[in-house]
Amino acid sequence: GAVVSQHPSWVICKSGTSVKIECRSLDFQATTMFWYRQFPKQSLMLMATSNEGSKATYEQGVEKDKFLINHASLTLSTLTVTSAHPEDSSFYICSAPDSLAKNIQYFGAGTRLSVL
Amino acid sequence: KQEVTQIPAALSVPEGENLVLNCSFTDSAIYNLQWFRQDPGKGLTSLLLIQSSQREQTSGRLNASLDKSSGRSTLYIAASQPGDSATYLCAVRLGTSGSARQLTFGSGTQLTVLP
């Protein structure tokens, strides 16, 4: 099946720094990718939809200036957490829909962000 | 707005037991329902996907059922093993456009199978 690769799997950073997370579709093209956030013992909450070649669509309550999304190619989307604070510590997961069956999504392994 | 509820939130069973995880959803006009497994600190692994026209799907020791009219799905795990320990997530999709906004997740059931 299709594979979505996410990097890094774990990152620790100091408060105030920025962190970039990469999401790649390895064997298929994805014009759209999705970014989720998951707090401990909670479910996945959609943060934004990344669109190749255009601006991302953010969900209500998600700050677009804090969570910068870039989808510069058909296989790569990046999420940058700018000026990270401890409350941004969470598990971030990306996904991409199947190129043919759009209602099937493939998920990355996730990135655990810990902000000190 | 679609809401997905999973009960119980946590479950601990001895090895070898058969068990059932429950998922309920408020809007029965779903396109499909999917069960995922999530290991600690890891991403999601798709287990079973049931289309709205189907009643159940089976894969190995796993069987998922869907009762759309009552807004319920169950995941049955036979002869549980310690390796089944993980969080199980249920997700329902309302439409076919492929938008993630149509995919709603439950909060999961954390399963521990004791050796």
Image (cartoon, coloured by chain):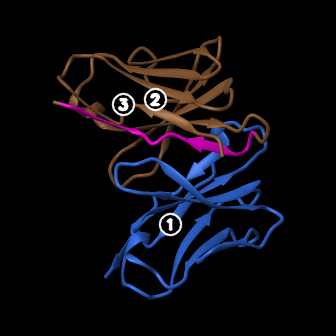
Q: Amino acid at mark 3?
A: Pro
Q: Mark 2 and mark 1 in contact? Answer it, CB < 8 Å.
A: no
User: Up-down: is A17 above or below B62?
Assistant: above
- Asked if labels 2 and 3 share a chain, the reply is yes
Q: Which chain gets the blue colouring?
A: B
Q: Nearer the viewer, residue A25 or A83?
A: A25
Q: Which subunit holds the residue at mark 3?
A: A
Question: In the shown orientation, is residue B84 left or right of residue B46?
Answer: left
Residue A106 included in the magenta stretch of the image? yes
Q: Amino acid at mark 1?
A: Gln
Residue B37 included in the magenta stretch of the image? no
Question: In the shown orientation, is residue B5 left or right of residue B11?
Answer: right
Circle number at residue A8: 3
Q: Which residue in the protein does label 1 denote?
A: B6
Residue B12 percent across, percent down from the top left:
35, 78
Q: Secondary structure at mark 3?
A: loop
Q: Colour of chain A?
A: brown
Magenta-colored span? A102-115
Q: Which subunit holds the residue at mark 1?
A: B
Picture residue at 45% right of the left edge, 51% below the top: A43
Picture residue at 59% right of the left edge, 49% below the top: B104
Q: Nearer the viewer, residue B20 or A42?
A: B20
Residue B93 percent across, percent down from the top left:
69, 50
Q: Is residue B105 visible?
A: yes
Q: Amino acid at mark 2?
A: Gly
